[in-house]
């Protein structure tokens, strides 16, 4: 009974892990990067320096929005947090015709001037890709990501049963032993950060739970808006009165709201019917101020600036959800804990990657003719190259494109993102056209070379290279370049190891996992 | 910086737990422990992990302390694994 349970779990673990492993690898990698999304954005906007203060930023944003969209249906202002320096604004035009997203959003510096040079989505793109993917409808992407997360949760639980020696082998990491080493790497990265993996997968599902399972809300509220109003204190859409009334100054209101929350920062401002007599201003507490990602809002009358009230999320279900989302996104984390989050995420990425490679390594030994494997094996092998080395190269190229594309390029933001996927596709094709063993070595070497090029290109194209940043004590830029170098070293080492193993296999030694990576990132 | 003290305690805890496992005793201590020694080493290991939590909870409060402790557990275990396998890494090529 016990063994049959383990066998069925092993089967389940293998195939659920394989089917969604490629997507999970991308989710883990970009999600890990997203812990530093504000720092990545800063690196990708080297012209923007210094810190921004919410009240001043809000005033700047208001000046900008009054000049481009004074009679919009609504404004939405995402204020800088303690790690970022820019303000993101969106507006909904009053006309009937829905406008393109690029025409209704802007990134502002702390003075409220639009940043038009070196347009980029920065680290925010990696964050959104983590759950919205790209080139596909957001709704589909979120369902796909949800299915992957569910499989992940199942794979973790079945994995603990499958790898029965996971705790007995807790401290074991044997190098240079082919399949055994891959299994060790998979087990060690899984078990060491097991609390993180369980937490991140479960809370990840919770972040989109009301989308995946909308029936609880649907059964109790006639409209989604009624639910938002009751739970989040969000007011339903109001009809503009048509009487003009200039909006109250946002700066003092931001300070007022902040004072209500013991000095915690305001994170977001949404304004309905700006510059109308019935305008309504709603401020939300910055998510970095507490575990709970959401919950506290303060509402003001737009025309007079009179405080209407504050809303505090109540109810244990809402508090639980809020804290779970907070735990997942880690916005509250100071830098030490943020690095722990990042390292755990990296562990998760290696866990998924080594699991994928393990599938091929395990089966290669059992192939009747290793020089000519069957079609399924070849597909998995090539997809592994595309998913692991391809994505890594793509991210590196995304950073390189940020420095190398012309500053005033039309649709620069989109071209930067395209370059990520072109590089990814390129490595994918490379993996198909070349013999698999060679393709691994070459793709890993390309990924390593791209990461190694980033600090160099940064030093050549900006005045904020590694050395000047070090002298100026600019730790964000120093750390970014150093992480790129560490990743480069990891990938190059992996390329060297895979080349060594290939020669060894050729020299008549027992062929085994020609595509192993010694260290991975 | 404030991670250093609890992380050190946690690494010590994991080392003790490793030393309570037969397969690591020869590498770590050069000899096998008796049954009683093994048991007390294991208890010391768990105790140290608990102390790590207590330090974090005292410094940061029980909620934040627990989150940070989980992160430090992963890091501490990773450091221990690296240290153990670095020492015992045999030239296999």
Image (tube, helix red, strand yellow):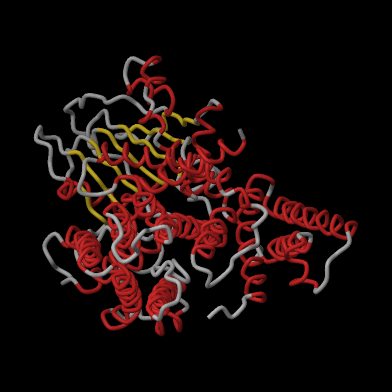
Residue shown at 57% from the left, 62% from the top: A336
Residue A27, how many percent across, how many down?
Answer: 37, 51
Residue A122 seen in the figure: yes
Q: Quadrant of the N terminus of chain A?
A: top right
B41 left or right, relative to A114: right
Location of residue A519 with respect to A63 vertically, above or below? below
Location of residue A430 with respect to A505 vertically, above or below? above
Nearer to the camera, A506 or A115: A506
Nearer to the camera, A169 or A366: A366
Location of residue A359 with respect to B82 vertically, above or below? above
Residue B69, how many percent across, how many down?
Answer: 65, 53
Residue A123, how many percent across, how many down?
Answer: 34, 59
Q: Quadrant of the C terminus of chain A?
A: bottom left
Nearer to the camera, A277 or A190: A190
Location of residue B58 with respect to A314 vertically, above or below? below
Nearer to the camera, A306 or A240: A240
In the rendered picture of this protein, how many numbered marks are placed on residues?
0
Q: Image quarter for residue A76?
A: top left
Q: Image quarter for residue A248?
A: top left
Residue shown at 44% from the left, 35% from the top: A297
Residue A218, how many percent across, how many down?
Answer: 36, 18
Residue shown at 36% from the left, 59% from the top: A368
A256 left or right, relative to A398: right
Residue A485 seen in the figure: no
């Amino acid at each position: 009974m016990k063994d049959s349970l383990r066998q069925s779990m092993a089967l389940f673990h293998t195939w659920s892990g394989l089917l969604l492993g490629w997507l999970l690898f991308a989710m883990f990698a970009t999600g890990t990067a997203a812990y530093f999304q504000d720092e990545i954005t800063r690196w990708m906007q080297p012209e923007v320096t210094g810190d921004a203060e919410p009240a001043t930023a809000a005033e700047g944003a208001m000046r900008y929005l009054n000049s481009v969209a004074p009679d919009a249906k609504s404004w939405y202002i995402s204020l800088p947090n303690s790690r970022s320096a820019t303000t993101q604004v969106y507006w909904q035009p009053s006309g009937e015709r829905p406008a393109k997203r690029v025409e209704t959003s802007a990134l502002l510096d702390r003075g409220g001037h639009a940043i038009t040079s070196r347009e980029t989505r920065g680290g925010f793109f990696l964050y959104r890709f983590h759950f919205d993917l790209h080139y596909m409808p957001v709704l589909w992407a979120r369902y796909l990501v949800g299915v992957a997360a569910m499989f992940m949760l199942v794979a973790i639980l079945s994995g603990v049963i499958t790898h029965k020696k996971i705790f007995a082998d807790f401290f074991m990491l044997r190098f240079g032993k082919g399949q055994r080493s891959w299994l060790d790497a998979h087990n060690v990265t899984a078990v060491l950060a097991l609390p993180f993996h369980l937490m991140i997968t479960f809370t990840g599902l919770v972040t989109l739970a009301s989308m995946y399972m909308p029936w609880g809300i649907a059964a109790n509220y006639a409209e989604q808006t009624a639910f938002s109003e009751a739970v989040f204190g969000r007011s339903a859409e109001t009809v503009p009165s048509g009487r003009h009334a200039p909006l109250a100054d946002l700066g003092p209101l931001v300070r007022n709201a902040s004072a209500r929350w013991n000095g915690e920062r305001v994170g977001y401002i949404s304004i309905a019917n700006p510059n109308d007599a019935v305008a309504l201003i709603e401020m939300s507490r910055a998510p970095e101020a507490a575990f709970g990602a959401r919950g506290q809002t303060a509402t003001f009358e737009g025309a007079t600036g009179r405080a209407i009230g504050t809303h505090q999320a109540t109810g244990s279900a809402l508090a639980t959800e809020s804290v779970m989302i907070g735990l997942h996104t880690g916005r509250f984390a100071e830098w030490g804990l943020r690095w722990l989050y990042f390292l755990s995420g990296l562990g998760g990425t290696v866990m998924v990657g080594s699991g994928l490679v393990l599938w091929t390594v395990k089966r290669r030994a059992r192939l009747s003719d290793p020089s000519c494997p069957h079609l399924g094996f070849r597909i998995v092998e090539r997809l592994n190259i595309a998913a692991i080395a391809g994505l890594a190269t793509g991210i590196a190229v995304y950073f390189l494109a940020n420095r190398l594309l012309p500053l005033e390029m039309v649709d620069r933001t989109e071209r930067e993102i395209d370059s990520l996927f072109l590089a990814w596709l390129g490595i994918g094709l490379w993996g198909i056209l070349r013999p698999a063993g060679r393709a691994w070595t070459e793709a890993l070497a390309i990924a390593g070379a791209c990461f190694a090029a980033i600090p160099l290109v940064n030093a050549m194209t900006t005045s904020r290279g590694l050395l000047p940043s070090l002298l100026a004590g600019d730790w964000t830029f120093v750390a970014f370049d150093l992480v790129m170098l560490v990743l480069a070293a990891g990938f190059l080492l992996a390329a060297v190891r895979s080349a060594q193993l290939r020669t060894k296999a050729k020299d008549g030694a027992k062929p085994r996992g020609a595509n192993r990576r010694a260290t991975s990132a | 910086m404030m991670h250093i003290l609890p992380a050190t305690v946690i690494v010590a805890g994991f080392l003790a737990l490793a030393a309570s496992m037969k397969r690591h005793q020869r590498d770590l201590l050069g000899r096998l422990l008796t049954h009683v020694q093994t048991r007390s080493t294991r208890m010391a290991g768990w105790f140290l992990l608990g102390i790590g939590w207590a330090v974090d909870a005292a410094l940061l409060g029980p909620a934040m302390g627990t989150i940070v402790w989980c992160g430090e557990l992963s890091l501490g275990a990773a450091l221990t694994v690296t240290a153990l396998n670095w020492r015992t890494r045999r030239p296999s090529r």
